[in-house]
Amino acid sequence: MKIALIAKDKPGALEIRKANREAHVAYLKSTDAVEMAGPFLDDDGNMCGSLIILNMDLAEATAWAANDPYKKANLFESVELIAWNKVLG
């Protein structure tokens, strides 16, 4: 099952994101369940959220998201985990 993790940063939290980015990227690379990942960008081109496609069930994705260094740093204003079906690409 594929899960789309859609996270939006708290306003004004770019420095929190930058300070924890290395640990977050290492966490992404620590599993083969991450199929693709990248930041959302605001109108100025600054990172302001995340889209991560996970190949795992919802319970596993919930646990995975809870251990993300960004989550632990309290970066996110919101996090959604939604079952997703890849059609193209």
Image (cartoon, rainbow, N blue to C red):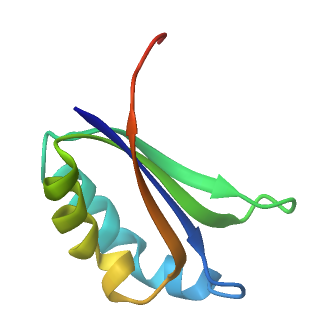
Residue 36's spot in the image, x, y percent?
A: 38, 37
**Quarter-wise, where is residue 54 in the image?**
top left
Relative horizontal placement of residue 10, taking residue 65 as reference (left or right): right
Q: Residue at x 87, y 59 (%)?
A: 43
Q: Foreground: 40 or 62? A: 62
Q: Quadrant of the N terminus?
A: top left
In this view, the residue farthest toward the right is 43
Rendered position, 18 above or below 87: below
Q: Foreground: 25 or 82? A: 82
Q: Foreground: 49 or 14? A: 49
Residue 60's spot in the image, x, y percent?
A: 13, 55
**Quarter-wise, where is residue 81 in the image?**
bottom left
Q: Residue at x 78, y 61 (%)?
A: 42
Residue 8's spot in the image, x, y percent?
A: 59, 68
Q: Residue at x 53, y 74 (%)?
A: 78
Q: Residue at x 71, y 88 (%)?
A: 12
Relative horizontal placement of residue 62, taking residue 41 as reference (left or right): left
Rendered position, 4 above or below 41: above
Residue 32's spot in the image, x, y percent?
A: 14, 39
